[in-house]
Amino acid sequence: DFDLVKVYVKAICFTLLIPVVFAIINRSLMTSVSFATCFIAMASGYTFSISEKNGMERLYGILPITKKEFVLGRYLYTIIMGGIAVLFSCIVHPIVLFILGDKVTWQQIIFTFLYGILLYSIYTVFQLPGYYKYGSINGRMFMYIPIIGFLLVGKDFITLWIGEKYLSVYYIILLLILPYTVSSTEDIADAALLAKGEVKVKALIFVIFGLVTLTLALILIPSFDAIGAAFA
């Protein structure tokens, strides 16, 4: 599984760096880690989409491992990826906040780390069974279960959790998650491009994506703060 996602390393690293921007803008460690866990959970389907596209089930079938061991291995891979993402965020984001002059205590870091692991677990506990049961494309509908729940009770949850003055976080999360749920359906097409060796196409798309995002963010952040960054 780690070998399968090597081609996505740059994309995953870029995904982990995006929440740093929100740490800078919101000055909130928990908010930025929340974004990081959400993004990395959505990337957990890469192994399924690549395997299906390249018919790797036949390869796994001849390996000296049982189906149970294979499934446990994939769950272990997912847990390790989530742990790395949360650990990275809980190290880098406090450093960024410290440079900006905000004090982050060890208690806050430990609590945020545990919260990030919990949030990541909630996302993946819905997604992985769906991938195994219905495949990487149809199984993505299970990814929407936490999102639907957030749409219904997100405002009340944020108000009770961090206070009404941070209610803008609700709209920021919606702006980030909803468009990504659409683009995440393109994983099979991404795998097809990689299988055909057309990496330049995807690289060009990422370059354009980064330039447009950065330009819009620089324009919108002065007027709309974090919501402007999320919209970009």
Image (cartoon, helix red, strand yellow):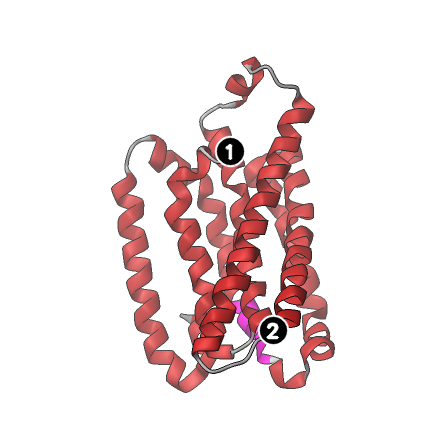
> Which residue is the site of mark 2?
170
The residue carrying mark 1 is: 1
x and y percentages locating residue 82 in the rendered image: 58, 50
Residue shown at 71%/75% (left/top)?
161
- Verify whether residue 171 appears in magenta: yes
**Circle 1 crowding by C-alpha within 10 Å: few under 14, some 14–19, many from 20:** some
Q: Is residue 197 visible?
A: yes
Which type of secondary structure does the marked residue at label 1 adopt? loop
Residue 220 on the magenta span: no
**Front in this rendered view, residue 82 or 125:** 82
Say which of 3 and 212 sits in front.
3
- Left or right of 164 in this view: 95: left
Give the SS element for disc 2.
helix
Q: Are marks 1 and 2 in contact (CB under 8 Å)?
A: no
Count all numbered tags in the image, as a single digit.
2
Q: Position of residue 128 (x, y in %)?
A: 64, 41
Q: Nearer the viewer, mark 1 or mark 2?
A: 1
The quadrant where residue 187 appears: top left
Q: Is residue 96 above or below residue 102?
A: above
The percent position of residue 17, horizontal first and vertical second, equals 43, 61
| Comes first in the chain, label 1 or label 2 | 1
Task: Specify the quadrant that holds the C terminus.
Answer: bottom left
Q: Is residue 227 visible?
A: no
Main structural element of the magenta stretch: helix, strand or loop?
Answer: helix
In this view of the protein, which residue sits in the foreground, 18 or 210? 18
| Label 2 crowd (10 A; few <14 / some 14-19 / many >=20) | some
* Residue 67 in the image: above or below residue 208: above
Q: Which residues are magenta?
A: 168-175
Q: Position of residue 146 (x, y in %)?
A: 67, 57
